[in-house]
Image: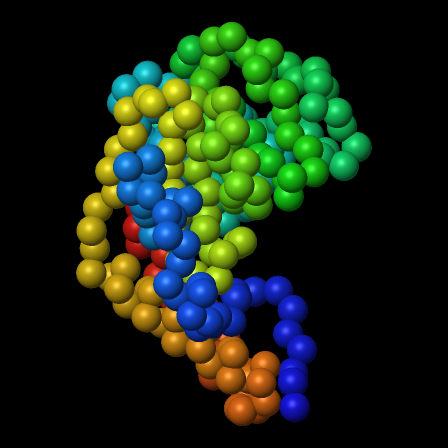
Amino acid sequence: MMNLEYGSDFYLMASEEFMNGEKESFFDEKRFNFFISGRSSLYSLLKNGIEKHNWEKVFIPSYYCKEVLPELSSLPLEIEEYKFNPFLDSENKELSLEDKSKNVLISIDFFGVNKINSEKYNNLFVIEDLTHNLYSIPFSKADYVFASLRKELPVPCGGITYSPKSLYLSQGKKDETANEVSLKKLTGMYLKKQYIEGLITNKEIYRELLKDGESLLDIFF
């Protein structure tokens, strides 16, 4: 018996091909800095920009994940939302953004459908969120890139930062709590696989572990 399940975290994929990975990993440590989540990756980039580039304002799309905003509001940055509909607007939509070096624009590649043409800005910095289009990372022309890995890949947690222009990137910090997050979510992913295969019937067993692991991500700021 197979159970159907939609959304949320991936179930554990323990195939030999996936566990061993490719000979040369796409995510090599020489190019990327690694974090516990996409949120902590973005937080690190903004904190780094305040310290290195004197950023004062960040432009964020109005449809952006609202769970991210409380963490970002703790930074000494003015947050301004802009409207961009990836299904209706063209990449050349005119946005009234102040093109100043003390400003930074967060541009999202919305599932590879559309994104803002940020190349028309000469002064403000650009951060691209490529969470839903990881394989476009090598082709980005932004100042910085970040992504959450678990939205496209069957991993329990993880985020990355990268600079196509080889700008300075802050390193992530090691924290033992990260092991607890990974273990909870990895166990939840394993039990979700058991549920999908019909080996267990109570889905709350894995959902509670996944939710507990998710709640711990808030402490990494």
Percent position (x, y) of residue 145? 44, 32
Residue 177, compared with residue 120, is above or below; it is: below
Q: Position of residue 12 (x, y in %)?
A: 47, 72
Quarter of the rendering containing residue 61: top right
Which quadrant, please, contains the N terminus? bottom right
User: Residue 35 location, x and y as percent?
Assistant: 32, 47
Relative placement, left or right, of 78 versus 64 is left
Residue 24 in the figure: left or right of residue 189: left
Exactly how many numbered labels are in the figure?
0
Q: At 54% across and 53% down in the image, what residue appears?
A: 152
Instruction: Kindly give the residue lying farthest to the right in the view shown.
Output: 88
Foreground pick, 41 / 23: 23
Residue 212 pos. (x, y %): 40, 69
Q: Quadrant of residue 31?
A: top left
Residue at left offset 28%, top offset 37%: 30
At horizontal 39% and vertical 70% (from top left) the residue drawn is: 186
Res 217 visible: yes
Q: How is the image coloured?
A: rainbow
Q: Residue at x 30, y 50 (%)?
A: 220
Relative vertical location of residue 93 with respect to residue 170 in this rendering, above or below: above
Residue 99 in the image: above or below residue 155: above
Quarter-wise, where is residue 26 in the image? top left
| Residue lying at the far front of the rendered structure | 23
Q: Nearer the viewer, residue 108 or 153?
A: 153
- The answer to whether residue 3 is left or right of residue 24 is right
Q: Is residue 218 visible?
A: no
From the viewer's side, name the closer residue of 31 and 102: 31
Front residue of 22/162: it is: 22
Instruction: Tell me if 123 is positioned left or right of 8 in this view.
Output: left
